[in-house]
Image (tube, rainbow, N blue to C red):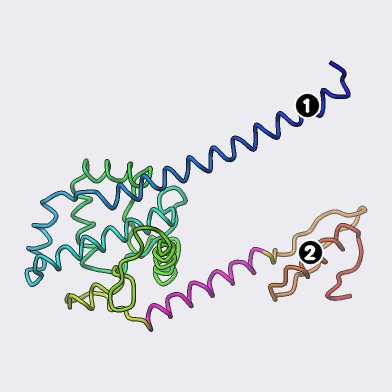
Amino acid sequence: MNSVYLVPLVFLVVVVTLTGFTIWSSLRKRQTDRTRVAYINAYQFPATLRGKLALKHANLNSEQLDLVFRALRQYFQACREAGAVKRSRSVGMPSKVVDDVWHDFMLISREYTAFCNKAFGGYLHHAPDSEMKVSMPIALGNTLQAIKARKGTATGVAMLGGIPLLFGIHSALAVEGGFEHDVQTIAAIEAKRNAANQAAACNRGSATPTPRLRRKNVFMRPPIPERCNLAARWRLRICLAMDCRNPFTG
């Protein structure tokens, strides 16, 4: 075969192979997600969990106990959506009564491990507030974002009092020592998380000045302004590459 046609043919084969692999990986991920969503929704929790919950909270009736387990499913769905296992992302627990059930579930180690492997692809650890990678308000913001990502799905999002069930269950059940949430606290949590994300984006774009050698002289990178301006940062990078002056300091 003529070499003139061989190179484009090889290139075409590589492009088609990579494209096919990308599509296959995407479809496989979607199918895995659908399978895990269905598994969490259909999972039958061990009967002993319900008995322990009834002993700890004797004031709850049968329907209210069911509500607690629905909230636990919502939390597990949020962990799956946020990638708490695969991406080690902190997903805060906003409900004490749901947290109690989660603790008891973990004690049934074989059942819990098997559940985690099928639901998340790995073990979902329970980290205390002091060992979380982010503050609790930010972790709760991650939980909210993951729950809201389910709104457009077939299963939807269970709500209670205008907020997600997981956040509103304590107010509805009047559990002592719980964490009270309402529309105002939910808005505050979301605002803190959004502010933290914006600050992180700015910090990623403003590197600390570091020395480097340039034409036998020590050249310091010009400081990037504190404001988070993507276009301005690229202008600075271009100037650095062209060895010109700092466009911000002259």
Q: Quadrant of residue 11?
A: top right
- SS label for mark 2: helix
Residue situated in front as seen by the camera: 132 or 116: 116
- Residue linked to disc 2: 234
Q: Which residues are magenta?
A: 184-204
Q: Is residue 134 left or right of residue 127?
A: right
Q: Which mark is residue 217?
A: none
Q: CA distance from mark 2 to mark 1?
A: 37 Å
Q: Are marks 2 and 1 in contact (CB under 8 Å)?
A: no
Q: Residue furthest front?
A: 154
Q: From this view, report whether residue 223 is shown above or below residue 216.
A: below
Q: Which mark is residue 9?
A: 1
- SS label for mark 1: helix
Where is the N terminus found, in terms of image quarters?
top right
Q: Is residue 187 left or right of residue 50?
A: right
Picture coordinates of residue 179 (x, y %)?
27, 75
Picture coordinates of residue 211 (x, y %)?
78, 59
Q: From this view, report whether residue 145 is shown above or below residue 4.
A: below
Q: Is residue 15 left or right of residue 178?
A: right
Q: Is residue 29 left or right of residue 231?
A: left
Q: From this view, report whether residue 36 is shown above or below residue 169.
A: above
